[in-house]
Image: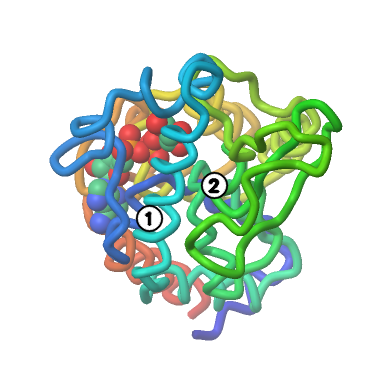
Amino acid sequence: MNLNKIKNKRIVFFTGAGMSAESGVPTYRGSGGIWNSYKWQEYACQRAFDSNPEHVLDFHQLRRIEALKCKPHVGHDIITQIQNYTNNSWIVTQNIDGMHQRAKSKNIIELHGSLWELRCEKEMKIFTDAKKPEYAIRLCECGTILRPNIVWFEDSLDQNILNNTYEIVSNCDFFISIGTSGVVFPAAGIPKLAKSNGALCIEINPENTSMSSYYDINIRKSATEGLKDFVEELSKNEK
Ligand code: APR
């Protein structure tokens, strides 16, 4: 890969569950999607946690066990390599599985939080708990049951994270969306922001999505194959 021309360009990779699908992590919607087997109302909202915290923690522990059985794939590595060629590229991910970190990518914004963090709502403390798939702790020293530091249904996104994301996306040259259905807001509105600020917007997804029309280029391929096409296009433009 020789991508000198993009060295000073800002690239934003905007990733969703389809980015991790080739690693074996299930998506949320579509065939095999998590929300086809589990009702989010019972596992992924504050009300569910308040009524049965252990049940919700067990569900997330299962997600951790499943995620650790999987490894980053070639597509994750391509993103890391592109990042190493550029001074200013970012990953804005809706994924909570930590796969980009395991692929040694940098500048990662986790819009929906992380499976590997827990939060004490009383003390407003965040604990990293990433050594083992099973939770090492479920209780804060103050006695409060820790909740996964994840943005669940009916939660608001962290405003500072969102503002930072908007600033980065508004000033990007390339916006590459990979593997998101584009149905969950406010994340789903981010491609529109990139487009309205003049970025070249590319969607990599084997399927059409509700946001497809906002993109300049639609690559109807899997994450890895689509990223290979993207790199090939960039390399062609260099010649
Ligand atoms: N490569 C690229 N895209 C793929 C692949 C693949 N190999 N396999 C599936 N996809 C695409 C699907 O076509 C679909 O459009 O990935 C998308 C996955 O969509 P969702 O399951 O809805 O995942 P996502 O968009 O990340 O969901 C957003 O919903 O439940 C919440 O908080 C959760 O962050 C999540 C949010």
Label 2: few (<14), some or many (≥20) within 10 Å?
many
Secondary structure found at label 1 = helix
Q: Where does the image place residue 202, in percent across and percent down from the top left?
A: 42, 47
Coloring scheme used: rainbow
Label 2: which secondary element: strand
Residue named by callout 1: 19
What's the residue at 35%, 69% (across, down)? 70
The x and y percentages for residue 1 are: 49, 85
Instruction: Establish whether ligand 1 lies closer than 8 Å to the Cβ of label 2.
Output: no
In the drawing, does residue 48 fall left or right of residue 125? left
Q: Which mark is residue 93?
A: 2
**Above or below, comparing residue 57 to residue 6 in the picture:** above
Residue positioned most to the left: 31
| Image quarter of residue 186 | top right
Q: Could you tell me residue 11's position as x and y percent?
A: 61, 56
Q: Describe residue 150's horizontal placement relative to residue 127 as left or right.
A: left
Question: Mark 1, residues whose alpha carbon is within 10 Å: few (<14), some, or many (≥20)?
Answer: many
Amino acid residing under circle 2: Thr
Asked if disc 1 is less than 8 Å from ligand 1, the answer is: yes
Question: Which amino acid does the dot numbered 1 rest on?
Answer: Met
Q: Position of residue 138 (x, y in %)?
A: 62, 45
> Residue at point 25% right, 34% down?
29
Residue drawn at 49 percent across, 59 percent down: 134
Please name the residue shown 59% across and 19% down the image: 155
Residue 15, above or below 45? below
